[in-house]
Amino acid sequence: MEYRLSPGKLIDITRPLDSNTPAWPGDVRFSKETKAIGAFRTSKLTMSSHCGTHIDPPAHLARYRTFVDDIPLNRLILPAVVVDCGKKRIIQKDLIEDLSLEGKALILKTSSGSPGEKSDSMEYAYLSVKAVELAVSMGIMTIGIDTFSVDPPDSTPVHEILLGASIPILENLQLNDVLPGNYLLICFPLKIVNGDGAPVRAFLQPAY
């Protein structure tokens, strides 16, 4: 499938990486050490592979062998549907059951990512098992959310279902200025060989 890009219409849905970037408790936070060498600056970056806006390939679960550099491009550049989940903490299947999702990315906008909400709070919105089972059966290719995880803290069933179906997961998106509707998702992870995850630069382009 061919897509027409309009740079002026792109919406950047990537969280900035700096010392304030939220990180999963116990994970490596982002830090940058910059020095001058002659006429140039160079920096040492330290961070988790799942810091900030990032992608989980199936190999995020230890038993799978599909890594970041194995993700097909048709799961990184594709039509997307953005759903506003409001203030719901558990995203149930009724929010998606009437959508057309075959061959598309499902992007979930929650109140957890809204202004005034603490971006590092562990009381975030996540998917129910029944919702994600329905989404998979409806043919989604990729899924994204503006929270730490598609699962509740200390739990993995949604990751198990999605990654077991080879569906990449985008987490920690920034969707404050995005309205519900149809878009083109463009998502570029770092090409880390055998990567269990990677930071991404992600964009949405309205589909009108």
Image (spheres, rainbow, N blue to C red):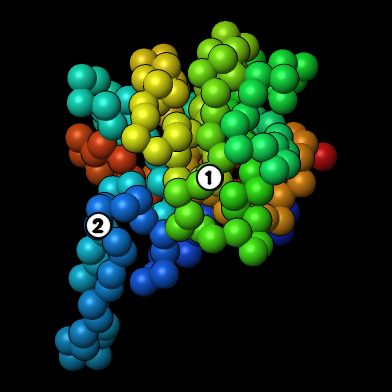
Q: Amino acid at mark 2?
A: Val
Type of the residue with mark 1: Tyr
The picture places residue 180, in percent across and down from the top left corner, at 76, 40
The picture quadrant where one finds residue 9 is bottom right
Residue 74 seen in this snapshot: yes
Q: Secondary structure at mark 2?
A: loop
* 109 vs 70: above or below: below
Q: Residues within 10 Å of mark 2 (few under 14, many from 20)?
A: some
Outermost residue on the left side: it is 37
Confirm whether residue 202 shows in the render.
no
Residue drawn at the location 36% of the way across and 26% of the way down: 156
Choose top left, top right, bottom left or bottom right for residue 205.
Answer: top right
Q: Quadrant of the N terminus?
A: top right
In the picture as drawn, the residue positioned furthest to the bottom comes out as: 38
The C terminus - image quarter:
top right
Q: Could you tell me residue 125's position as x and y percent?
A: 56, 40
Q: Residue at x 37, y 29 (%)?
A: 155
Q: Which mark is residue 28?
A: 2
Q: How many marks?
A: 2
User: Percent from the top left, x then y, of residue 24?
Assistant: 35, 51
The reply, left or right, for residue 64 in relation to residue 140 is left
Q: Residue at x 56, y 15 (%)?
A: 130
Which residue position holds label 1? 124
Q: Nearer the viewer, residue 37 or 147?
A: 147
Q: Nearer the viewer, mark 1 or mark 2?
A: 1
